[in-house]
């Protein structure tokens, strides 16, 4: 968070989280081949690239795209909704796996592969309510994740960052608070872009 980063937002998502702020990514988009995309990326000074969506793992070309970016010495991260296996993702890519809570209403259990190898992986929970917080804490305990990098992000408009920070402190949670920095920096801009 806070690093100037090039975002590649891939179109299409099979989920419908109730808090989704990128609904335009369900259908809108422009078809680009990998070469054109690489040329566009190279025009920016940043060496950090985040592949997001939608659900980026729905597009098979995302795998060679990530590998080519790593080969060009980019620091690549992947944001994925967690119910698609990440085993084919290049090991140089940092995976941020979004584990859907009950109040996301996404009904998407995390794929069993995604909790086996947590090398270069962060597990993220968007917390919508106190019940989601309790569910996430239980999930961490039951899956022995207290030594893994776990992020709790407050769902914008549903629970405040301050309230979530206080919950983390009171519970002695191993999770790290993550905020949507762009929404604090540019509150009046179209969100999710
Ligand atoms: S997974 Fe992401 S893009 Fe898909 S519905 Fe949920 S928040 Fe929106």
Image: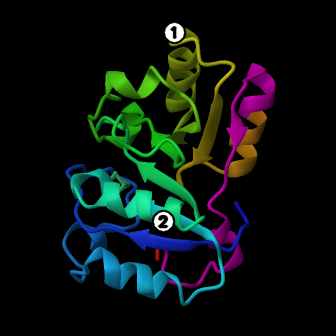
Give the residue drawn at x 63%, y 33%: 150
Q: Nearer the viewer, residue 46 or 53?
A: 46
Give the residue drawn at x 43%, y 86%: 39
- Among all residues in the image, which is located at the extreme bottom? 43
- 185 displayed left or right of 82: right
Coloration mode: rainbow
Is residue 128 visible in the rendered structure shown here?
no
Mark 1 neighbour density, 10 Å: few (under 14) some (14–19) many (20 or more): few
Circles 2, 1 touching at the beta carbon (< 8 Å): no
Give the residue drawn at x 32%, y 28%: 111
Is residue 166 visible in the rendered structure shown here?
yes
What's the magenta region? 167-192
Nearer to us: label 2 or label 1 = 2
- 149 displayed left or right of 127: right
The residue indicated by pointer 2 is: 69
Mark 2 neighbour density, 10 Å: few (under 14) some (14–19) many (20 or more): some
Quick one: SS at disc 2? Answer: helix
Give the residue drawn at x 29%, y 70%: 25
In the rendered image, residue 107, in percent from the top left (x then y), is placed at 26, 34
In the rendered image, residue 102, in percent from the top left (x then y), is placed at 38, 32
For ligand 1, give the image quadrant: bottom left
- 16 displayed left or right of 71: left
Q: Nearer the viewer, residue 51 or 53?
A: 51
Question: Please, is residue 83 above or below residue 19 in the view?
Answer: above
Of the 4 image quadrants, the one containing the N terminus is bottom right
The residue indicated by pointer 1 is: 142
Q: Earlier in the sequence, mark 2 or mark 1?
A: 2
Q: Quadrant of residue 47?
A: bottom right
- 28 displayed left or right of 77: left
Q: Quadrant of residue 105?
A: top left
Q: Is residue 49 magenta?
A: no
Mark 2 vs mark 1, CA separation in Å: 36 Å
């Amino acid at each position: 968070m806070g690093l100037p980063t090039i975002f590649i937002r891939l179109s299409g998502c099979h989920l419908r989280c109730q808090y989704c702020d990128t609904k335009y990514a369900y259908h809108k988009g422009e078809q680009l081949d990998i070469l054109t995309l690489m040329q566009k990326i190279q025009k920016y000074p940043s060496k950090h690239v985040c592949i997001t969506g939608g659900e980026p793992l729905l597009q098979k070309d995302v795998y060679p795209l990530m590998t080519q970016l790593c080969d060009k010495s980019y620091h690549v991260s992947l944001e994925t909704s967690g119910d698609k296996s990440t085993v084919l993702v290049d090991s140089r890519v940092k995976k941020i796996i979004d584990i859907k809570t009950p109040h996301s209403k996404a009904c998407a259990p995390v794929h069993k592969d995604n909790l086996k190898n947590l090398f270069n992986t962060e597990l993220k929970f968007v917390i919508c309510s106190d019940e989601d917080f309790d569910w996430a804490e239980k999930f961490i305990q039951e899956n022995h994740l207290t030594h893994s990098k776990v992020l709790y992000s407050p769902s914008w408009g549903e629970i405040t960052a301050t309230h979530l920070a206080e919950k983390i402190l009171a519970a002695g949670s191993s999770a790290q608070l993550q905020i949507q920095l762009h929404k604090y920096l540019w509150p009046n801009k179209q969100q999710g872009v």
